[in-house]
C-alpha cells in the first residue's frame, strides 16, 4: 500500500519543479518587454534647418523608441531633384515654395505641403566687419569679395529678388550650393561678405557678424514641409511633420531666428 503513494508524491514533485523552472512567464507577471522595432525615418531638409532639426531629432527619437532619424541636409533644389530621381525619402522640408513645387509637380507629395516657418536674408561679414559693409549696395564694391548662393537655390533666388528690387547687380567671387557653404567661405576668410539667412548668422555663434538690410523683407522665404508619396515610413513621417508644425517645433525654430509661417 505504501508504494503507490510514494510514486504519486514523486510525480507531483516533478510537475512542481518543472513549473517553477519554466523560463516563460505569462503577460503582465514581470517578464521583460520585447525591444522596440528598429526603424529609420529619412528626412530631406534644407541646409538652413540644420540646427533646428538636429534639436528636434533628439526629441523625436526620445518619443519614439527604436527610431533613428536620418537627416539629409543640402540645397533645396538638389534635394528636390534627388527625390524626383527616386531617392528614398519619408519627409521633405524645403526652403522655398518653388523647390517644393518640383516635387509636388512630379506627383511625389502625399498631401498638400504645409508652410511651417519663414526666413530672411542677412549679410554675413567677418567679426568686426573690417570692410565696413553697411548696406546691400556695399556688396557690389570692387574691393569687397562677396559670395552668394547659386540662383537655383532658394537663398540664391532671394538674392536675385533683392538685386532686381534695388537695381544693384552683384559680381560674386563664387556661387555656392547652399547657405552653409556661403557661411563657410566668410568664416574661413575666403570672402569678405556673403548673403545667407539670419538663422545661419545666429547659428555661427560669433564666427561671423550679421548686417541686416531693409530690402531683405521683400524676399522673405517660406519653408514648406510634406510627407513624400509612398514613404517607406509614412506613419513616422506624419509624426515628424506634426512635431515640426506643432508647439515644440515652433519653439525650436524660433530659437534659431525663424519667423512664424
Image: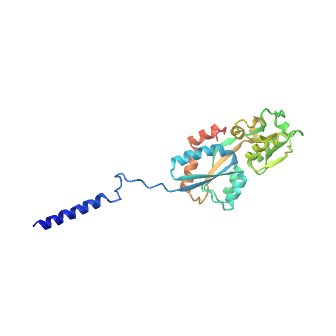
Q: Position of residue 230 (x, y in %)?
A: 59, 60
User: Is 177 on the left-hand or right-hand side of 22?
Assistant: right
Q: Which quarter of the image is occupied by the N terminus?
A: bottom left
Decide if residue 177 is on the left or right side of residue 63. Answer: right
Q: Quadrant of residue 128?
A: top right
The percent position of residue 88, horizontal first and vertical second, equals 63, 59
Q: Position of residue 162 (x, y in %)?
A: 80, 41
Q: Is residue 244 visible?
A: no
Give the number of callouts.
Answer: 0
Q: Note whether 143 is above or below 82 in the view shown.
A: above
Residue farthest to the right? Answer: 142
Question: In the rendered view, how is the structure colored?
Answer: rainbow
Q: Residue at x 51, y 53 (%)?
A: 66
Residue placed most toward the observer, 135 or 189: 189
Front residue (pair 113, 235): 235
Q: Where does residue 184 sit, x and y in percent of width and height? A: 76, 44
The quadrant holding residue 261 is top right
State the residue in front, 68 or 13. 13
Question: Residue at image x 69%, y 58%?
Answer: 82
Residue at the left extreme, as displayed: 1
Question: Image point 23% across, 61% down: which residue?
Answer: 13
User: Can see residue 70?
Assistant: yes
Q: Please state if 247 lies on the left or on the right of 154 as rendered.
A: left
In this rendering, is residue 257 above or below 17? above
Amino acid at each position: 500500500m505504501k508504494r503507490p503513494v510514494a510514486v504519486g508524491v514523486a510525480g507531483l514533485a516533478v510537475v512542481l519543479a518543472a513549473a517553477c523552472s519554466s523560463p516563460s512567464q505569462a503577460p503582465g507577471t514581470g517578464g521583460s518587454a520585447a525591444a522596440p522595432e528598429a526603424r529609420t525615418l529619412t528626412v530631406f531638409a534644407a541646409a538652413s534647418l540644420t540646427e533646428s532639426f538636429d534639436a528636434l531629432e533628439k526629441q523625436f527619437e526620445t518619443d519614439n523608441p527604436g527610431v533613428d532619424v536620418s537627416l539629409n541636409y543640402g540645397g533645396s533644389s538638389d534635394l528636390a531633384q534627388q527625390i524626383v530621381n527616386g531617392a528614398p525619402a519619408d519627409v521633405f522640408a524645403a526652403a522655398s515654395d518653388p523647390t517644393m513645387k518640383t516635387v509636388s509637380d512630379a506627383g511625389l507629395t502625399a498631401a498638400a505641403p504645409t508652410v511651417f516657418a519663414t526666413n530672411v536674408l542677412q549679410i554675413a561679414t567677418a567679426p568686426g566687419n573690417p570692410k565696413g559693409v553697411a548696406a546691400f549696395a556695399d556688396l557690389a564694391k570692387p574691393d569687397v569679395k562677396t559670395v552668394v548662393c547659386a540662383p537655383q537655390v532658394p537663398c540664391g533666388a532671394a538674392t536675385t529678388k533683392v538685386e532686381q528690387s534695388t537695381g544693384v547687380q552683384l559680381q560674386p567671387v563664387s556661387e555656392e550650393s547652399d547657405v552653409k557653404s556661403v557661411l563657410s567661405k566668410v568664416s574661413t576668410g575666403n570672402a569678405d561678405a556673403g548673403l545667407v539667412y539670419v538663422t545661419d548668422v545666429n547659428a555661427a555663434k560669433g564666427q561671423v557678424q550679421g548686417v541686416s538690410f531693409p530690402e531683405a523683407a521683400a524676399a522673405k522665404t517660406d519653408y514648406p514641409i510634406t510627407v513624400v508619396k509612398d514613404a517607406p515610413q509614412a506613419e513616422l513621417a506624419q509624426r515628424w511633420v506634426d512635431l515640426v508644425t506643432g508647439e515644440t517645433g515652433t519653439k525650436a525654430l524660433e530659437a534659431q531666428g525663424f519667423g512664424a509661417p
